[in-house]
Image (cartoon, rainbow, N blue to C red):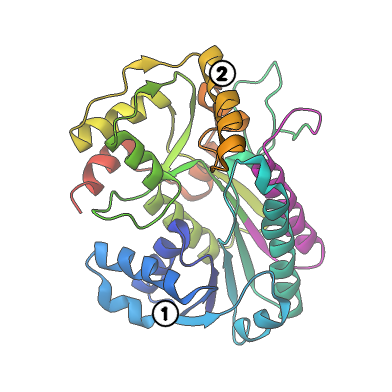
Amino acid sequence: MVLVTGGTGLVGAHLLLHLIENGENVRAIYRNQNNIQKTKSVFELYKKGDLFEKINWLEADILDVPSLENAFINIDYVYHCAALISFDPKDEDSLRKTNIEGTANMVNFSIAKEIKKFCFVSSIAALGDIAPHETYITEETDWNPEKPHSDYAISKYGAEMEVWRGLQEGLNVIIINPGVILGPIPKTKIFEQGSSELYQKVANGLSFYTLGNTGFIAITDVVRIAHELMKSTIKNERFTLIADNIIFRDILNTIADTLKVKKPGIHAKPLLMNFLWIADAIFSTLFFQKRSITKATAKASYSKNLYSNEKIKTALGTVFLDVHQYIKDVSKL
């Protein structure tokens, strides 16, 4: 049997659907009964609602060690997708606790229960820092602790250290580092973060674009590759998962065209982005509001990091979906 954490999130929900479609016997853990509806909505979006009933749901929490005891009964493989995603400095403690301590708990149980293979869904945020003589960030790029990193990036890097510790203690592991994951464009809001939030901002008339870039990938590619890696003989490796490096303006324009709304028309240069995050910090402090832009997200918006996907293409012969076409296709669901 396969255990999936984070099954009520974007990656976890799509992974559950993919695994069941491919004949896997799956158990998923949840903290809040109401959140299971999000996963059901994903199955229904793809007209696969009947498959939802095949999930063996169990209430448990990766931070509650006793609750994990039952979750690991008869489990052979683990996909650890659960994570807190936030770039708000106020969430530093929660990020470290959920992403590092929670992963450590999952690794410890996997070692104790002699799990055959453990897949950890990390992020390109946990990859290294490019050196002056380098062009692309790869799985081998060194992490430089002297350079600034977001709390989220630090927490995912720390989580990876727990997974590598598991390797040293005899656990077979796979780490995947997806870029920005683009999911479907649902008619109703299912998830609050990630691509759902991006689609919503464009739909609501986002005015600004930047000329920074990063790696993007479709959610269907992420879960398909994760499953292929777990079924393969490959172990104790990490893989960068991006379909392409894309300029933010171009991805925003594709979303706007797909949604038939106005494209963002104002180029937000680094100076403006830095002003916006400072203003947002002041506003959120004065009015007790959630941060909408932080120093980390502002910097990321104009950074021009290039990521290499050569390792996964060589390992599995992976052919990625074109991200722009994917956005157009999922708008028809």
Towards the viewer: 262 or 185: 262
Q: Amino acid at mark 1?
A: Ile
| Structural distance between the alpha carbons of marks 1 and 2 | 47 Å
Towards the viewer: 84 or 136: 84
Towards the viewer: 44 or 206: 206
Q: Amino acid at mark 2?
A: Phe
Total residue callouts = 2
Q: Going from the N terminus, do you reach mark 1 or mark 2 first?
A: 1
- At x 38% / y 43%, what residue is drawn? 320
Residue 296 x %, y %: 61, 31
Quadrant in the picture for residue 264: top left
Q: Is residue 187 left or right of residue 294?
A: left
The magenta-colored residue range is: 145-174
Q: Is residue 144 left or right of residue 276?
A: right
- Judge whether residue 137 can be spotted in this image: no
Mark 1 neighbour density, 10 Å: few (under 14) some (14–19) many (20 or more)? some
Residue at mark 2? 275
Residue 185 drawn above or below residue 166: above
Towards the viewer: 9 or 24: 9
Q: Is residue 173 magenta?
A: yes
